């Protein structure tokens, strides 16, 4: 699913965001990317979603190479990715349903399927009474769940979540991590970044990518799904 | 293709949302586009009418050939035959003194009483010669050389002036189309760029979700084409009323002006304005979208 060899990212101003490392993530794996703020977690996620290109090494996602020369394939790769952005990136002025449906309109799903799937996922994340409320009127936590629903409803092969526990208290952060982990299936891998290492330590069947000033340290526990 | 069909309602709704985001500004832009197209329709209608009037007058070009006094009927017939054989002459008709008098009476209308001051009919008989306008110089020259001809009167100057006016109007129309085209493109691409700027975050998110370029751009194209089409329709409604009024004013008091059929003129306008609206709407949107690429 993901194969990285000597993958490296250096920004144009010379900042080394990700130092060379190798990684292999298979179907149905759960991967936590941890590290303090500025350690390079988001940069790595940007590489995985194709919004940054490797400056060194190679990166293959879902069988497609990620590089500048292959920018046309990136939108197709993204069809199979369910991203959950740190700041959610919901479309203001649109309802929860519309936001979720928007992410599904161009990936070959039929209108009836889109409607059905969007509704069922929103119910699954606990927003059954907020389906037709504009996201402008939802709380921070509710917006986060809409963002999760948008990512999951696309039936992605890979869910990428950037700091999903960011502004949550301990109890809600644990719930959020459990919710995201619950979307892992034999075909869907989940990768999330978090600086709340104390909440995920000892989690069985997961891969931990620890980042420190661009340096990557990979640790595997248990088996994949 | 399926994605287009499945998302048709979404694209329309998005275009309306984009339009509504800067409602007042966009309404004024729409009205400006309508007014620009209205000026264009008036010029095109004028061009259309003047061309067909000139063509009609050219088609009926005539010169009057006055012959020397005292010719016998046989000599007049002989002259008529000679004139008929001149290259470029389409018809020859003898107008006698009485018919010439009657024609002048009908031209003068209410002022015809001025003719009663003459003790005798002041008008001479003449040959009314229908000609090909392009051959006028050669025809006049040949007829002037005929022994029995006293005077040839042509309306060459009037015809040339009409022809010149028609040429000028042609030129003005081309300039008008170019001016309307450029102005519409500038207004439209600016509106589209504004729309894209206001939706930059949404566009960015859609790109990250893997939306293809056409999916992101289509609502902006629909907005652009919708605006020029609405502006075009607005101008057609206005020009229909204005043309009807002009036809009413001209065809009553000036019945001798051979105006083309109003329905035909409107039909030409509709085809031209709708065609231009579609082309300019598409191009304006394309410029707007392409010039915004890379900035967002």
Image (spheres, helix red, strand yellow):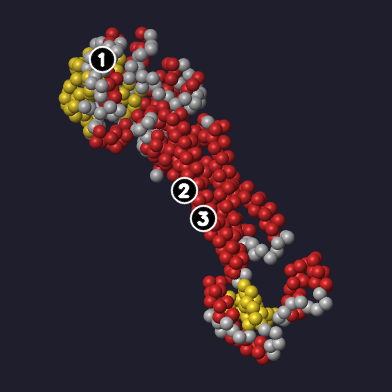
> In front: A178, or B286?
B286
Q: Residue at x 80, y 65 (%)?
A: B110
Q: Nearer the viewer, mark 1 or mark 3?
A: 3
- Label 1, label 3: how many angstroms apart (C-alpha)? 68 Å
User: Alpha-carbon distance for marks 1 and 2?
Assistant: 52 Å
Closer-to-camera residue (A172/B228): B228
Residue B44, image x and y in percent? Answer: 56, 54
Q: Secondary structure at mark 2?
A: helix
Q: Which mark is residue B279?
A: 2
Quadrant in the picture for the N terminus of chain B: top left
The residue where tag 1 is placed is: A39
Report whether B258 appears left or right of A219: right
Lateral position of residue B177 relative to residue A102, left or right: right
At x 48% / y 19%, what residue is drawn?
A138
Q: In the drawing, does residue B51 fall left or right of residue B66?
A: left
Residue tagged by mark 3?
B171
- The foreground one among B170 and B262 is B170
**Residue B147 appears in the picture as rendered:** yes
**Residue B18 picture location, percent across and down:** 49, 33
């Amino acid at each position: 699913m993901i194969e990285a060899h000597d993958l490296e990212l250096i920004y144009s101003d010379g900042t080394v965001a990700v130092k060379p490392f190798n990684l292999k993530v298979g179907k149905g794996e759960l991967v936590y990317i941890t590290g303090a703020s500025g350690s390079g977690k988001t940069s790595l996620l940007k590489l995985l979603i194709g919004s940054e290109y490797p400056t060194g090494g190679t990166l293959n996602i879902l069988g497609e190479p990620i590089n500048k020369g292959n920018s046309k394939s990136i939108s197709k790769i993204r069809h199979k990715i369910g991203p959950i952005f740190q700041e959610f990136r919901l479309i203001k002025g649109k309802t929860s349903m519309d936001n979720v449906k928007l992410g599904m309109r161009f990936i070959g799903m039929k209108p009836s399927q889109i409607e059905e799937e969007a509704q069922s996922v929103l119910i699954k994340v606990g927003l059954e009474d907020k389906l037709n409320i504009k996201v402008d009127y939802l709380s921070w936590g509710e917006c986060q769940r809409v963002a999760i629903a948008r990512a999951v409803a696309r039936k992605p092969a890979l869910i990428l979540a950037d700091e999903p526990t960011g502004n949550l208290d301990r109890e809600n952060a644990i719930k959020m991590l459990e919710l995201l982990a619950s979307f892992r299936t034999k075909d869907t891998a989940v990768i999330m970044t978090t600086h709340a290492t104390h909440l995920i330590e000892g989690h069985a069947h997961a891969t931990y990518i620890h980042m420190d000033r661009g340096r990557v340290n990979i640790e595997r526990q248990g088996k994949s799904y | 293709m399926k994605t287009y069909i499945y998302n048709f309602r979404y694209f329309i709704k998005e275009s309306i949302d984009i339009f509504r985001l800067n409602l007042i500004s966009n309404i004024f832009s729409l009205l400006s586009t309508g007014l620009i197209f209205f000026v264009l329709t008036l010029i095109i209608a004028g061009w259309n009418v003047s061309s067909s009037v000139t063509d009609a007058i050219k088609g009926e070009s005539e010169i009057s050939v006055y012959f020397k006094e005292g010719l016998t009927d046989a000599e007049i017939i002989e002259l008529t035959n000679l004139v008929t054989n001149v290259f470029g002459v389409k018809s020859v008709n003898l107008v006698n003194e009485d018919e010439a008098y009657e024609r002048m009476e009908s031209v003068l209308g209410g002022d015809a009483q001025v003719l009663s001051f003459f003790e005798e009919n002041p008008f001479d008989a003449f040959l009314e010669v229908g000609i090909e306008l392009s051959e006028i110089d050669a025809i006049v020259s040949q007829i002037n050389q005929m022994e029995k001809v006293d005077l040839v009167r042509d309306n060459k100057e009037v015809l040339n002036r009409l022809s010149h006016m028609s040429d000028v109007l042609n030129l003005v129309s081309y300039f008008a189309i170019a001016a309307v085209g450029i102005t519409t493109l500038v207004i439209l691409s600016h509106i589209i760029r504004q729309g894209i700027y206001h939706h930059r975050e949404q566009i960015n998110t859609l790109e990250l979700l893997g939306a293809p370029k056409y999916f992101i751009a289509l609502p902006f194209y629909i907005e652009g084409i919708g605006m020029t089409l609405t502006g075009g329709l607005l101008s057609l409604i206005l020009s229909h009323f204005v043309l009807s009024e002009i036809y009413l004013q001209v065809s009553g008091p000036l019945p001798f002006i051979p105006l083309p059929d109003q329905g035909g003129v409107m039909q030409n306008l509709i085809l031209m304005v709708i065609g231009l609206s579609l082309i300019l709407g598409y191009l304006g949107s394309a410029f707007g979208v392409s010039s915004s690429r890379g900035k967002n």
